Amino acid sequence: MLQKTLSRWLVCLVAVAFLTGCPKPATERGQKPAAHTTGPATAEAAPSATQPAAPSTTEQAAQPSEAQPAEQPSQAAPSEEAAKPEAQQPAPAPTQQEAMPAPETTPPAAESQPAQPAAQQESAEKPKGEVSSQPAEKPADPQPAGAQSAAPQGTPYEVKVPLGLPPLPIPEDNPMTVEKIELGKMLYFDKRVSADGSVSCATCHDPNMAWAEHTPTSKGIHGQVGTRNAPTVINAAYATSQFWDGRAKTLEEQALGPVANPIEMGHTIEGMVQSLDGIPQYKELFQKVFGTGVTPENFAKAIAAFERTVLSGNSPYDRYRAGDENALTEAQKRGLKVFEESGCADCHTPPLFSSYEFYNAGVGMNKEKPDEGRKAVTGKDEDFGKFRVPSLREVANTAPYFHDGSAATLEEAVAVMAAGGIDNPHRSEEFDTVREAKITPEQQKDLVEFLKALSGEYPKIEPPQLP
């Protein structure tokens, strides 16, 4: 009897204990087992190991997500693939460029990614605290301080192209601004760009001489005499190459050439930059225009921008083409007809009156040591003695003529070309057309009169005040 009573009490005590004090396994209460902090993350491992129980659905929606968007509770912890920009996934949390890793107790797969602060979008250029395991991915704004995008833009300058000229080609990397052109004008007239402070761009390309020089060839530093005539800057912005031999492709490239030429400005590029950089006002102007100090590239850009404003058009010829029948004299009209029918226009092609191709007209080929011309650039024998076709606009104001300045007057130059050039083993066959036209002396006079009708309006600029 006693044993039966004790057995009943024991059964009751066990029952009470199970009903009141023994915890049930987590799976029986509907709770998922805690994730292992050392194993790979899985879809079941969303709650942190430090949390005693998973929050309710309502609590999850209320908490900001640090590792993954709240709408994707079943997504695995971020792996290398998950480090791609979160902009591809909708999330209520602030958009970030890379997925934010979970807290410190996250599985190692997520810890391998660098922590990205929430303010990354506002200051992407600040260095991160850790090095990313994916170096190929970059912040949205990888440009360093002082990059071109941070440079001042300046006041846009609208080039007014004169009547008769085509639209002006302007490089995308050198837009025209008022401030840049003004800086370029200073540099153009500044003799301090030469080694001894005696030669500027304007020395050989004088605005008062139709942006050229009325001597056969020019004098450089220490009175050294060059071998080629200084071509005019007028309409050089349209040329497909620069210099008589075309060794420079752009005005920017051309601007640096004379600086380092030992018989022109006789400087070094580095020395020129140091000289200008030592002038406080130039440093300030370069900083204002380009956002940098004095550099060779920006020196060239400033001068080239200024030279692109040196245009000539609205000549009697242009007005005649525009419909003004009285813009040309009768002699000029006859000269125009000869010019078009005898082959002159094949090389001196309107409206710029140059094709900017290279030909051997025989000029200077009788010298003991002729100028190689284009061959010095290309190394090709067939280019021996070839020179770039000069533009004929303002030709009446840019004597003497040819690459060596050997023709003192326009009449002399026309006579040479009307004869189809000067015979030599390398004479270009293109001159045969003109030779076969048999231009008479009277027609040559008409040609000269027509060429005078190519003189129009161009800027005449006085030297500015220099720093």
Image (tube, rainbow, N blue to C red):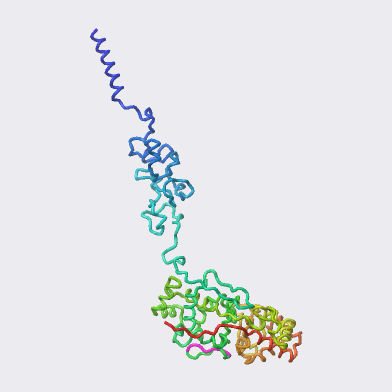
- Counting from the top left corner in percent of width and height, residue 240 is at 60, 75
Residue 245 is left or right of residue 61, and the answer is right
Report which quarter residue 429 is drawn in: bottom right
- Quadrant in which the C terminus appears: bottom left
Between residue 110 and residue 452, name the one nearer to us. 452
The answer to which image quadrant residue 407 occupies is bottom right
- Compared with 174, 58 (above or below) is above
Q: Residue furthest top?
A: 1
Q: Position of residue 251 (x, y in %)?
A: 55, 77
Q: How many marks?
A: 0
Q: Main secondary structure of the magenta part?
A: loop
Q: Residue at x 51, y 90 (%)?
A: 224
Give, as a single range, the part of the protein colored magenta. 216-221
Work out which residue is located at the far left of the displayed protein and give it: 2
Q: Position of residue 440 (x, y in %)?
A: 75, 90
Asked if residue 93 can be seen in this view, the reply is yes
Which quarter of the rendering shows the N terminus? Answer: top left
